[in-house]
Amino acid sequence: MAINPSIITRDLDKIAEKTGNLYESLHVVGQRAKQISSTLKEELNNKLSEFASTVDNLEEVFENKEQIEISKFYERMPKPSTMAMEEFLEGKVYHRFPSEEGAE
């Protein structure tokens, strides 16, 4: 049976210690993953828009090797949730609790 290299066992205590609560930590990671995902999607759409064809005729549509390479590059990238979790565990994600700041 092949092992999927993208599956990583995480220590939940390490994740929880950043915020004091596992669920808050996962919420922060989820929000960061959304940010990464939207940024990557925007980048990909901008790069692929260069290849957009205004012609709807099937005879004039052809394969573009550069477009295929760009798509393959983005397909091989790690998932946004994985990237967000790595950033969070390395301390690269800034998070705050607005309800606590307003009380001070």
Image (cartoon, rainbow, N blue to C red):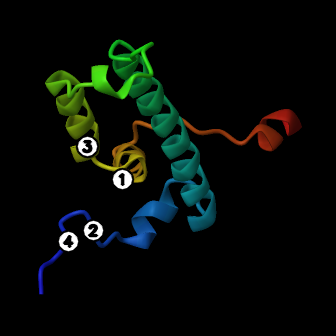
Front position in the image: 36 or 71? 71
Question: For this view, does 20 lie left or right of residue 10?
Answer: right
Q: CA distance from mark 1 to mark 2?
A: 9 Å
Q: CA distance from mark 4 to mark 2?
A: 9 Å
Residue 93: x %, y % from top left: 47, 38
Looking at marks 3 and 1 on the same chain, the residue that comes earlier in the sequence is marked by 3
Q: CA distance from mark 4 to mark 3?
A: 15 Å
Mark 4 is on which residue type?
Answer: Asn
- For image coordinates 21% across by 36% down, the residue present is 73
Front position in the image: 98 or 37? 37
- For image coordinates 42% across by 46% down, the residue present is 84
Looking at marks 4 and 3 on the same chain, the residue that comes earlier in the sequence is marked by 4
Q: Give the structural element (helix, strand or loop) at label 1.
A: helix
Mark 1 is on which residue type?
Answer: Thr
Q: Nearer the viewer, mark 3 or mark 2?
A: 3
Mark 3 is on which residue type?
Answer: Met
Question: For this view, does 13 lie left or right of residue 61?
Answer: right
Residue 74: x %, y % from top left: 28, 37
Quadrant of res 50? top left
Q: Within 10 Å of the Cα at label 1, are there few (<14), some (14-19), or many (20+) other Cα atoms?
A: some
Residue 90: numbered disc: none
Mark 3 = which residue? 77
Q: CA distance from mark 3 to mark 1?
A: 10 Å
Residue 51: x %, y % from top left: 33, 16
User: Are circles 1 and 2 on residues that touch, CB within 8 Å?
Assistant: yes
Q: Give the structural element (helix, strand or loop) at label 3.
A: loop
Mark 2 = which residue? 8
Looking at marks 1 and 4 on the same chain, the residue that comes earlier in the sequence is marked by 4
Q: CA distance from mark 1 to mark 4?
A: 14 Å
Residue 4: numbered disc: 4
Q: Within 10 Å of the Cα at label 4, are there few (<14), some (14-19), or many (20+) other Cα atoms?
A: few
Mark 1 = which residue? 82
